[in-house]
């Protein structure tokens, strides 16, 4: 059985068994021994630990992989001056797709009115995080201490440092050739590690999802059903209509092949709810399954995992309209424009870890003068939406990487079209 099927089965089993466990645990009359086994030994014991270890083993690869892979990509650039053009294209496409995502979300949310008729008797209390100024955000892109940047996982700083080292290696003549070759070898070793890790995914995914669903179940949906459906609907349209159309228009490549090859990566993103933890898998897929050259993928994928969050922007768009409706407040046309701009910035500022999209939503709400406490209304169902939107986030990163690579002669179409290329067993 192939890996995708095994992960899917593990996922399904985990959701079903986890939800049953949650229902059992909620029953006050449950036998003490059974409760102890289900709760302390399984959900909060074995599977909790295994799930954490699985995510840790993905995360541990992120910084070394981004650094090594990007140094490799840049130092082997034949024409270093093309780097500027490449970055500009990548960033513009990331912004464009996010803009489309948020507009789509606002359109669907005004159409379906998820917040109409929602009663506001909630224990709404949510405190907005402190804001950072734009000046500080810009300054923070540049590292003062590369080791600290790596230790703290500050991805943009790691990217800047790797770009500089790569550029210098590319200009260092014979010495540069030697060290560039060493980076190449290291990159291959790290990629091997990613492949090894992928084969453990069914177990990791089971552990992760079992303990998640055993603890919180599917949440109380109630009034939030239309909100959830609107978010999921917008995510689906963006992933299955907008991305394929963009890919076809910009590259002429087959969206079906693209989606098929992205399945494992999407499952990883869904299970971990983190674009960052999924980054090693996204990078491997984009290079080895979709045929994008390392010089493009090593830059575009980590940058995307850090700044490109279309799924998150969609949630924020729908949530803003939902909260406005729930509080009975009207949004003017200028408010919608403001939401588009701030949600784009918020998506750039959202770190690729679980739940952060909800934190940056505060910024969007404040911008249009909506009560930040509204976030308390949707917190209950956010985890499941987080999982789905993260899968969309990583799909966007890969789609843009393929598009940029195609425009720069940086894609091997034989690899893209070969169903077996880079398959992890
Ligand atoms: N979990 C999302 C991601 O990692 C970010 C978010 O929307 O909270 O891509």
Image (cartoon, helix red, strand yellow):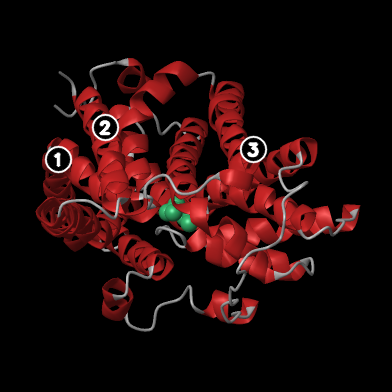
Q: Residues within 10 Å of mark 1 (few under 14, many from 20)?
A: some
Q: Is residue 172 left or right of residue 116?
A: left
Q: Is residue 49 left or right of residue 296?
A: left
Residue 367, compared with residue 416, is above or below; it is below
Q: Nearer the viewer, residue 283 or 404?
A: 283
Residue 288 badge: 2
Q: Position of residue 368 (x, y in %)?
A: 79, 65
Q: Residue at x 19, y 27 (%)?
A: 6
Q: Residues within 10 Å of mark 3 (few under 14, many from 20)?
A: many
Q: Is residue 204 visible?
A: yes
- The residue pinned by badge 3 equals 230
Q: Position of residue 69 (x, y in %)?
A: 27, 52
Give the alpha-carbon distance from disc 2 to disc 1, as whole Å: 23 Å
Quarter of the image containing the N terminus? top left
2 and 3 marks in contact (CB < 8 Å): no
First along the sequence among labels 2 and 3: 3
Which residue reaches farthest front? 29
2 and 1 marks in contact (CB < 8 Å): no
Q: Does the beta carbon at disc 3 come under 8 Å from ligand 1?
A: no
- The residue pinned by badge 1 equals 203
Q: Considering the numbered disc 1 on the image, is that residue within a helix, a strand or a loop?
A: helix
Q: Position of residue 398 (x, y in %)?
A: 43, 38
Residue 304 badge: none
Q: Residue at x 60, y 76 (%)?
A: 128
């Amino acid at each position: 059985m192939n890996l995708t099927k095994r992960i899917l089965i593990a996922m399904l089993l985990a959701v079903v068994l986890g939800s049953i466990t949650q229902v059992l645990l909620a029953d006050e009359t449950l036998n003490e021994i059974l409760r102890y086994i289900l709760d302390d030994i399984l959900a909060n014991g074995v599977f909790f630990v295994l799930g954490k270890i699985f995510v840790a083993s993905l995360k541990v690869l992120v910084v070394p992989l981004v650094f090594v892979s990007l140094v490799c990509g840049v130092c082997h650039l034949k024409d270093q001056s093309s780097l500027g053009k490449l970055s500009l294209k990548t960033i513009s496409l990331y912004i464009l797709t996010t803009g489309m995502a948020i507009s789509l979300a606002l359109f669907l949310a005004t159409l379906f009115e998820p917040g109409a008729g929602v009663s506001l008797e909630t224990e709404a209390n949510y405190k907005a995080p402190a804001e950072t100024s734009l000046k500080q955000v810009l300054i923070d892109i540049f590292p003062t201490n590369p080791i600290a940047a790596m230790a703290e996982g500050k991805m943009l700083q790691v990217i800047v440092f790797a770009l500089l080292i790569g550029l210098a290696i590319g200009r260092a003549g014979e010495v540069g050739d030697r060290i560039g070759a060493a980076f190449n070898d290291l990159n291959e070793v790290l990629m091997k590690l990613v492949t090894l890790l992928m084969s453990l995914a069914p177990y990791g995914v089971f552990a992760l999802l079992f303990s998640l669903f055993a603890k919180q179940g599917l949440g109380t949906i109630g009034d939030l059903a239309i909100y959830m459906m609107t978010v999921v609907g917008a995510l689906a349209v963006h992933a299955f209509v907008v991305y394929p159309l963009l890919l076809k228009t910009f590259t002429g490549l087959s969206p079906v092949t693209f989606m098929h090859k992205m399945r494992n990566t999407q499952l990883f993103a869904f299970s971990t709810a983190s674009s960052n933890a999924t980054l090693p898998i996204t990078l491997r897929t984009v290079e080895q399954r979709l045929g994008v050259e390392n010089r493009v993928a090593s830059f575009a994928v980590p940058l995307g995992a850090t700044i490109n969050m279309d799924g998150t922007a969609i949630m924020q768009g729908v949530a803003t309209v939902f909260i406005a409706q729930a509080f009975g407040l009207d949004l003017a046309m200028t408010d919608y424009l403001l939401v588009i701009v701030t949600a784009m910035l918020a998506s750039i500022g959202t770190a690729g870890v679980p739940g952060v999209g909800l934190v940056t939503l505060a910024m969007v709400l404040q911008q249009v003068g909506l009560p930040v406490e509204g976030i308390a209304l949707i917190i209950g169902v956010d985890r499941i939406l987080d999982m789905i939107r993260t899968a969309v986030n990583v799909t966007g990163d890969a789609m843009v990487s393929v598009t940029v690579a195609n425009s720069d002669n940086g894609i091997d179409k034989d690899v893209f079209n070969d169903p077996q290329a880079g398959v992890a067993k």
